[in-house]
Amino acid sequence: MRRFSLFLALIIMFTCCKTKMKSDNPFFNEWETPFEVPPFDQIKASHYMPAYLKAFEEQKQEIKAIINNPGKPDFENTIKPYIYSGELLTKVNRVFSGLNSANTNDTLQEINKEVAPLLSKHNDDISLNDSLFQRVKLVFENKDKFNLTKEELKILDDTYKDFVRSGAALSPENKEKLRKINEELSVLSVRFGQNLLAETNDFKLILDKEEDLSGLPEGVRAQAASIAKTYGMDGKCVFTLQVPSMTPFLQYSDRRDLREKLFTAYFMKGDNDNANDNKKIISRIARLRVERSQLLGYDTYADFVLERNMAKTPERVIDFLLQVWNAAIPVAKAEAAAQQKLITKEGGKFRLQPWDWWYYTEKIRKEKYDLDDEITRPYFMIDNVMKGMFYVANRLYGLNFSERNDIPKYHPDVVTFEVTRAGNHVGILMIDNYPRDSKRGGAWCGVYRSQSRDLKGNMITPVVTMVTNSTPPSGDKPALLTATEAETLFHEFGHALHQLLSNTTYPGFTGTAVSRDFVELPSQIMEHWVLEPEVLKEYAKHYETGEVIPAEIVEKLDKSSKFNTGFATVEFLAAALLDMDYHMLSEPVDPDIREFEKRTLDKYGLIPEIKPRYRSTYFNHIWASGYASGYYSYYWSEMLDADAFQAFKETGDIFNKEVASKFENEILSRGGTRDPLEMYIAFRGKEPGVDALLINRGLK
């Protein structure tokens, strides 16, 4: 009996110890969720700062252990432990960054302000650590002695260059200057993004009179009424600066004064001389980036960034952009002239303005093709569009997607899928589609965990998130998308496939960890399948009747696919050229933002009827999202994807298994373990040229 009592006591004591060891902070525990998905339902705002602080300390100790290793520096005792260091920090930062973008609040934004300079300092403490750098340098200088694989040689080369580009070779005095610049830039970037979110959320066009709704189709009115309800304005219609809300109003509203009001609010975001104004922030960022680049030995920030991209130099980027610009400007001018002719025909006594473009373009499209978004929307129910994406991925790569309702989610809008192939688990995909005040604008793809292998060689599978701001359900209607929104879903899904099909070893070099002007290839090639008849018949079905989209509508979609391409190309390129001009500054000046923007756009000859897709003050890509000197990359990648899709077309089978396998093996699976041009040539057998892009856009 006593022996039994002692045994029972030991069990109780062991259980208590285990319970005591389990922390209240989920980041300090093993995640017991399916597939170790973040336990969003358990994570509280109060958990982040303690987790960040512990993560900083853990990685510091890991770096210290590398430096103090008595062995002669080699890949195994220096590069590998460095790459695998900071596991907790990566875990915390991915969850925090993901939620701060997709489901933020005032508390998370305050934490972001506090964390940004700490994270900057922590990263600088590592990248500017001379003892660590000297070990990395020794390995790099002796790489031929270590019998490394091609993947390991690429990783070693990138790691060494990352240290140099981060300032490791600078003098102590210049390292201190660099630290201060990095810290200030991190804070300014956060402020820019928060100001932009506030500006976007602050404006609402509230309408409650029938005459104010003139021209708006029933579906657009219902969507606006649904938005109004979310703000407690039953019986009214609300239009916001979110693109799915704004664009239909600009397309259909007969009220020119209201179109001007809504569009002006959009293009003046961050430029209103108020508490959320971004002009001074941009000016300061631009100056600091010049100072930082010149400290590191580069003439401009663009030189610094592009050294690691496929394009290599600012001159090559400008040459590429102007080739497309010069082809597109005449087309855009012809489109503007056609709209002005229609205005005059209808008795209008005014010159075409940017807020008129969508309205008159829609009229011409309707007249020319008897087609508008309200005709096609019923066939693009969002659930069916996602099924279409999955169908394409299954035909190309053998992937299957099963919805899972037992996995934690950070918001009710999230839909979660387990991805498998031949019965084996591949990863988890979370899709979050609808606009809300807690979500920044645009669309993106990220990871809560990327694919890699642990130190024992075991596969770590990815947890991927796709976020869009698609048209939401309204009233008793499901979410019905435009063809453009369907294309956006396929685009982000392409990024997701890049993550899901990654098959490399080392953290930080998997999935989308490739050069900025290569990363859009996997996403943009997916757009080519959206309107292929063979794909449309699988998913483009009327949400009420189940009828497959009629052949005549498909034909009209195909014929109109190059319609308004001058505008679409020019508004994009105007933003890309603006990005390049900011980052080709060779003197640390504080530019007047309005004046700089006007001078740049006038220099390239932007016509007054078109505004850049992103003006400076809401150009989140380049001031807060890592695309500085890189916005051109969408079109650079289109040069690649237009050519790459031809590899399928040339076989006569858009689902050709051999081509798909080659695309997966040479590009999707390799992450950043090989030079991007080498990857592309290995897939296609040749370098791409700009002609494929021009033909794809109907500009040649």
Image (cartoon, helix red, strand yellow):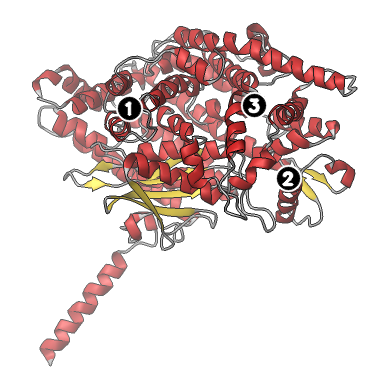
**Mark 2 Cα shell of 10 Å, populated few (<14), some (14-19), many (≥20):** many
The kind of residue on which mark 3 rests is Thr
SS assignment at label 3: helix
**Residue to which mark 2 is pinned:** 220
**Mark 3 Cα shell of 10 Å, populated few (<14), some (14-19), many (≥20):** many
Look at the image and tell me in which quarter the N terminus lies. bottom left
Residue 546 circle label: none
Question: x, y (%) of residue 81?
Answer: 21, 37
| Front position among marks 3 and 1 | 3
Query: Is 650 left, or right, of 383 in this rendering?
Result: left
Does residue 70 lie above or below 677 as drawn? below
Between the residue at mark 2 and the residue at mark 3, the CA separation in whole angstroms equals 28 Å
Q: How many marks?
A: 3
Tell whether label 1 touches label 3 (CB within 8 Å). Answer: no
Query: Is 522 left, or right, of 544 in this rendering?
Result: left
Indicate which disc, 2 or 3, sits on the residue closer to the N terminus.
2
**Residue to which mark 3 is pinned:** 617
Does residue 511 lie above or below 540 as drawn? above
On the question of residue 242 being in view, the answer is no
The kind of residue on which mark 2 rests is Val
Query: Is 277 left, or right, of 99 in this rendering?
Result: right
**Mark 1 Cα shell of 10 Å, populated few (<14), some (14-19), many (≥20):** some
Does residue 343 lie above or below 523 as drawn? above
The kind of residue on which mark 1 rests is Ser
Question: x, y (%) of residue 19?
Answer: 30, 69
Q: Residue at x 41, y 16 (%)?
A: 306
**Residue to which mark 1 is pinned:** 127
Tell whether label 1 touches label 2 (CB within 8 Å). Answer: no
